[in-house]
Image (tube, rainbow, N blue to C red):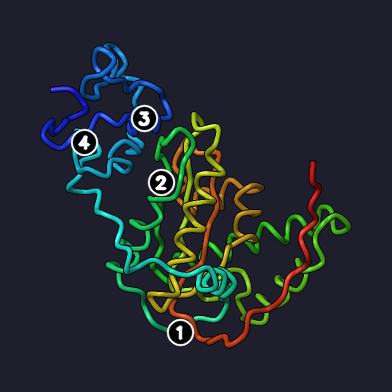
Amino acid sequence: MGLLIIDESRCKKDSLCVRECPMAIIKLKDGDGFPEIAPGSEAVCNDCGHCVAICPHDALDHARVPKERSPLIDKDLEITGDQAVQFLRSRRSVRFFKDQAVEREKLQRLIEIARYAPTGGNRQLVEWVVFTDRDQIKGIAEHTVTWMRKVLEKAPQSVPPYFPLIVGAWDMGYDSVTWSAPVLLLASAPREVNTGLVDLTLALSYLELAAPKFGLGTCWAGVVCGAMQGSASVREAMGLPEGHPHYYPMMLGYSKPKYVRLPERKAPKITWR
């Protein structure tokens, strides 16, 4: 059996799947028959599922992207334009978390949601490391501060102005590296994926947009990422898989603050051509 399974009693031969296929490997058999993948082209299929998603007659199935795992779009769940704008604008970087562990089931659910983010060529090679041990997360913050001290000693004029503030706060017992977050996530991608950084950034963006609906807040751990770029010990402490040059960490936990307004941002700079 091939990748495409056609219910001939439902198929209208309307060529929607033919026109939609981004790899251009689906055709109508003999020009006017039922859809099929061109002989010898199955290896080219990237399993995007567009052919399953586009068929309005429920006539097409795909062996690796089955209909049973591709639910129909529920029109009752569609949101308005205004709702979409508020949803996106209400995203905040959360740096103050409740002293409460996050259930593994919620973390699993968020990562499952993040896997629906687009990836280059639909390769879906983003991997995750999840830290929930407070001592481990504090150790990563300490490794980061150690790296910052070295940078400050070596080239104090070249560092961002917040470096001394973070190190000084750490020395006074205040963690402004990982903000005492109960969870630290690391998304990464292997070297062979030239879109790896974009892929994992989109995945983290999906995750952080979904997180508030589970009562959770997130913050991109930029200081830790900088330390990973400059320190092998930090990369090791973060459990970065070998051969993964693309990565970014994110803090997560139950949010303390509750925001009531949507802050303004700079107007976009647009060049029309």
Res. 133 image quadrant: bottom left
According to the image, label 3 marks what residue? 46
Q: Nearer the viewer, residue 124 or 241?
A: 124
Q: Amino acid at mark 1?
A: Lys
Q: Nearer the viewer, residue 221 or 266?
A: 266
x then y, percent, for residue 46: 36, 30
On screen, residue 79 above or below 272:
below
Q: Could you say which disc has been placed on residue 127 in the image?
A: 2
Q: CA distance from mark 1 to mark 2?
A: 27 Å
Is disc 2 in contact with disc 3, using a CB cutoff of under 8 Å? no
Mark 1 Cα shell of 10 Å, populated few (<14), some (14-19), many (≥20):
some
First in sequence: mark 1 vs mark 3: 3
Q: Could you say which disc has been placed on residue 30 in the image?
A: none
According to the image, label 1 marks what residue? 98
Mark 3 Cα shell of 10 Å, populated few (<14), some (14-19), many (≥20):
few
According to the image, label 4 marks what residue? 60
- Residue lying at 75% horizontally and 74% vertically, measured from the top left: 165
On screen, residue 86 above or below 192:
below
Q: Nearer the viewer, residue 85 or 251?
A: 85
First in sequence: mark 4 vs mark 1: 4
Q: CA distance from mark 2 to mark 3?
A: 19 Å
Is disc 4 in contact with disc 2, using a CB cutoff of under 8 Å? no
Is disc 1 in contact with disc 3, using a CB cutoff of under 8 Å? no
First in sequence: mark 2 vs mark 3: 3
SS for callout 4: strand
Please identify the quadrant where the N terminus is shown. top left
SS for callout 1: loop
x then y, percent, for residue 121: 45, 32
